[in-house]
Amino acid sequence: MAEQRPGSDILSCEGLTKEFRYGPKEKIRALDGVTLRAARGAVTGLIGPDGAGKTTLIRLATGLFAPEAGAIHVLGIDVPTDPQTVQSRVGYMPQRFGLYEDLTVEENLNLYAELHGITSATRAERYPQLMQMTGLGPFKRRLAGRLSGGMKQKLGLACTLVSTPELLLLDEPTAGMSVQETRQTMELIAKITREKGLTLLFTEHDMEVVFSISQRIMVLYQGRLIAEGIPGEIRNNPEVQKVYLGEGR
């Protein structure tokens, strides 16, 4: 198994194609020959209109989906060949994170810590940081089912970060949060990513957040990569502007 080399890409896709079938004949091509790279140690924003293929790409990177064609490697690992190893080394937060609503905030954290083999000593060090980051400290003994939507998202984020994964894949991690909560949370995520030398690939609807914290941005539209670059390049890209003005391509 190939291991990730220092300075190499942590995620790479070559001609990645994914289709979904609806009924015996109809199918939709969610990704159409996508080739891209995400650099190790970088904060990369993945943007595009609804249905552009963002969630599909992230799920392919976690091994939850298998592609129809092309290749995808994460941490130097061929994802379709060895999805379990990839899943043990990345942190993935889907749009609807799976919390146990009949467990408390702390019990949810303990469950995810046990799944990742986190020791008691590490938990004692890490939990206060996560509680401070998410603002959940006063609610450690509250049942997850009694949290607000935004607080549930924050707990999901804390559970994802409890193992300090090498790569964070976050699919709209601030769904249900206010604009202020979104920006504060994403700034903290970016800060943690930098301090711990992690890599972050995320999707987010708040474009100002994406432009403010990302080192690179990738733009998907109708299953294809139409642009990538630093935030200034993407903000001024005519094709990206047309997509977001609703004019199509």
Image (cartoon, rainbow, N blue to C red):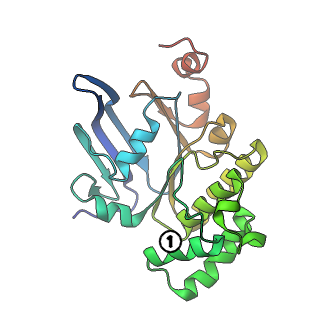
Residue appearing at x 32%, y 52% in the figure: 63
Residue type marked 1: Tyr
Instruction: Specify whether 184 is left or right of 80.
Output: right
Residue appearing at x 39%, y 41% in the figure: 57
Residue 222 sits above or below residue 64 on the image? above
| Residue that lies at the very extreme toward the front in this rendered image | 102
Residue appearing at x 21%, y 64% in the figure: 1
Whether residue 32 is visible, yes or no, is yes
Residue appearing at x 53%, y 55% in the figure: 97
Residue 111: x, y in percent? 51, 74
Within 10 Å of disc 1 (Cα), the crowding (few <14, some 14-19, many 20+) is: some
Q: Nearer the viewer, residue 103 or 169?
A: 103
Residue for badge 1: 112
Instruction: Specify whether 173 is left or right of 134.
Output: left
Residue 146, quarter of picture: bottom right
| Residue that lies at the very extreme toward the bottom in this rendered image | 121
Instruction: Specify whether 149 is left or right of 112.
Output: right
Whether residue 4 is visible, yes or no, is no
Q: Nearer the viewer, residue 159 or 198?
A: 159
Q: Nearer the viewer, residue 76 or 61?
A: 61
Residue 26, quarter of picture: top left
Q: Nearer the viewer, residue 58 or 113?
A: 113
Tag 1, which secondary structure?
helix
Residue 107: x, y in percent? 59, 75
Residue 191: x, y in percent? 65, 59
Residue 221: x, y in percent? 45, 25
